[in-house]
Image: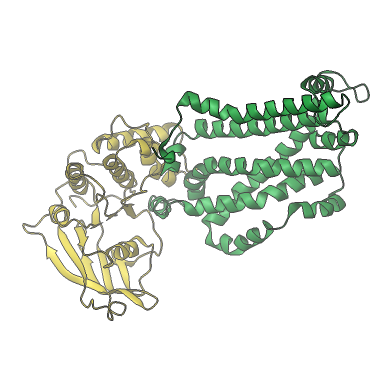
């Protein structure tokens, strides 16, 4: 049988999906044991028990200096920045995406501007943001917005342009004005596609968040990782990375779930 | 229920002439079928009538008034595909025209107005044989049912002219026969002038009052670009068909002006 026709059964597929994770974990444990056997003070690959101890200290014990649970306050600080930036990006992308996709005049005026701005490397702008907006929250949020917004606008305006011409004609023959077409025909059909776009931008958003926190911050997950890096505290860095990955994965999963539940008609449209 | 007049209409794309010397009078309440080989400009003709394309020369008049250069609620349309909105249920699709008409800002009706429109839409859905499917999304309907829905959606808004672009081309023969019966009934019971593009000659002769054939008179390769298609045959169907007097409980038009009696 050809490889392209070999489909694993459902159960087998679950085992196969788990396999790479298990292999990485086993590889880590073996490597860690080997290094610790040679030098019990090795910091590069800490034992699972050492990491558990670090997590316990960071997540479940009050920090004497700040009087808070460090991992919790770091998470709140980071998520606050990430979510407010994504909220700004999403709202702006929705408005500009629909306007550019639906109105030829707006497309003529803004289309190439958005294309060009989406090519500006956001991290290169970070110094400018720090200079102009200071080192506070605003510059970090602005970096994430700048990093994600042009791509989302481009993506959404293309999705609007991809709507069948027949639908827009049909809406006009039902007497719809431009505003009504945007509100009743385009917006509801763009929302599920907006979720796709948002999912794709989660990766870049986290990247810019960690980068901004690493460079100038006094709280946040990225700040903590880059702080403890000075002490080679791999027992803290590794759990933090896993925690960040888990948060990003959960956000992605929640968005996918929202798309399926809120827009039951969308799956068959996409299948076409 | 409007007279259509094409006055020496030409359509060119750059140097390429698609249609030339189209002069045509269509009586109110006619059922016009446009036939002809692929690429002979039938669809271009329909798109001009829809207002989606402008004639290069000549003009199109509806009831003596030059055509608006964009689609509007006077002319309903059913395409072969993508005629209904995938994000709306069957009932919402039919309601949409009424909601857009009466709610300029939100495009939605509430309360009593919504109730009245819903009752009307449900009656219309029953007429076209979609009773019991109100809450389904179009993707859950068969091709024939989607086209019935598209017809109901267009008729609900009460257009004067209904334009059909190969509406039944993708349907099985049996389903097509059923929907022909429905189409005839809609034409009889509403006050529509219908213009239909079709590939199917038997469909054209079964439904229409008048069949127009488009053809390129000069089709040698070196002539193709410079000579467009024109009307080659104009056949009145005999025995002559006219729309029946409207039934006792006609499908109500959404137009505000009173329809002519016994039109």
Label the yellow chain with its letter: B
Is A39 left, or right, of A3 in this rendering? right
**Could you tell me residue A5's position as x and y percent?**
40, 38
**In this figure, what is the number of numbered marks?**
0
User: Which corner quadrant of the image does residue B6 belong to?
Assistant: bottom left
Q: Residue furthest right?
A: A65
Quadrant location of the C terminus of chain A in the rendered image: top left
**Could you tell me residue A204's position as x and y percent?**
69, 45
Q: Determine the residue positioned at 49% across, 47% down.
A: A186
Q: Name the foreground residue: A162 vs B48.
A: A162
Q: Is residue B253 visible?
A: no
Q: Name the foreground residue: B213 vs A259.
A: A259
Q: With respect to residue A61, does B30 lie above or below?
A: below
Quadrant location of the N terminus of chain A in the rendered image: top left
Chain A image colour:
green
Q: Name the foreground residue: B98 vs A135.
A: A135
Q: Determine the residue positioned at 49% across, 43% down.
A: A189
**Could you tell me residue A184's position as x and y percent?**
48, 44
Is B145 left, or right, of A16 in this rendering? left
Q: Name the foreground residue: B55 vs B242.
A: B55
């Amino acid at each position: 049988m050809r490889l392209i026709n070999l489909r694993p059964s459902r159960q087998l597929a679950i085992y196969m999906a788990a396999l790479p994770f298990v292999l990485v974990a086993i590889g880590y444990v073996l490597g860690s044991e080997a290094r610790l056997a040679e030098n019990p003070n090795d910091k590069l690959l800490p034992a699972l028990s050492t990491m558990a101890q670090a997590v316990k200290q960071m997540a479940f014990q009050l920090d004497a200096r700040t009087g808070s649970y460090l991992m919790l306050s770091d998470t709140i600080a980071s998520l606050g920045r990430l979510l407010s930036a994504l909220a700004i990006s999403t709202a702006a992308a929705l408005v500009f995406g629909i306007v550019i996709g639906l109105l030829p005049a707006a497309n003529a005026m803004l289309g190439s501007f958005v294309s060009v701005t989406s090519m500006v490397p956001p991290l290169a702008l970070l110094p400018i943001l720090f200079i102009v907006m200071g080192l506070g929250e605003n510059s970090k949020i602005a970096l994430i917005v700048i990093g994600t917004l042009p791509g989302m606008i481009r993506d959404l305006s293309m999705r609007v342009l991809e709507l069948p011409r027949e639908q827009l004609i049909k809406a006009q023959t039902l007497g719809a004005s431009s505003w009504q077409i945007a509100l009743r025909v385009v917006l509801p059909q763009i929302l599920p596609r907006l979720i796709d776009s948002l999912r794709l931008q989660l990766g870049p958003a986290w990247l810019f968040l960690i980068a901004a926190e690493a460079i100038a911050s006094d709280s946040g997950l990225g700040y903590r990782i880059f702080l403890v890096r000075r002490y080679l505290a791999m027992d803290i860095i590794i759990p933090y990375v896993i925690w960040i990955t888990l948060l990003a994965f959960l956000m992605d999963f929640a968005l996918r779930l929202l798309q399926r539940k809120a827009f039951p008609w969308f799956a068959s449209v996409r299948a076409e | 229920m409007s007279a259509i007049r094409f006055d020496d209409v030409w359509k060119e794309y750059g140097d390429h002439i698609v249609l030339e010397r189209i002069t045509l009078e269509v009586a109110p309440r006619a059922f016009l079928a446009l036939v002809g080989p692929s690429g002979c400009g039938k669809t271009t003709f329909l798109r001009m009538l829809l207002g989606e394309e402008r004639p290069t020369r000549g003009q199109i008049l509806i009831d003596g008034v030059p055509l608006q250069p964009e689609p509007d609620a006077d002319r309903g349309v059913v395409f072969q595909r993508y005629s209904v909105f995938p994000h709306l249920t069957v009932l919402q699709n039919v309601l949409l025209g009424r909601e857009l008409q009466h709610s300029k800002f939100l495009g939605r009706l509430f309360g009593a107005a919504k109730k009245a429109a819903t009752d009307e839409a449900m009656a219309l859905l029953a007429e076209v044989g979609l009773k019991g499917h109100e809450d389904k999304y179009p993707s859950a309907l068969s091709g024939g049912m989607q086209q019935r829905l598209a017809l109901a959606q267009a008729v609900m808004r009460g257009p004067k002219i209904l334009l059909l672009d190969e509406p039944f081309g993708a349907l099985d023969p049996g389903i097509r026969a059923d929907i022909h019966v429905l189409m005839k009934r809609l034409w009889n019971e509403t006050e529509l002038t219908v213009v239909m593009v079709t590939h199917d000659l038997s469909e054209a002769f079964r439904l229409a009052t008048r069949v127009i054939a488009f053809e390129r008179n000069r089709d040698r390769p070196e002539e193709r670009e410079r000579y467009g298609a024109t009307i080659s045959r104009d056949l009145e169907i005999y025995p002559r068909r006219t729309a029946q007097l409207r039934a006792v409980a006609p499908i109500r038009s959404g137009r505000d002006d009173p329809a002519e009696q016994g039109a």
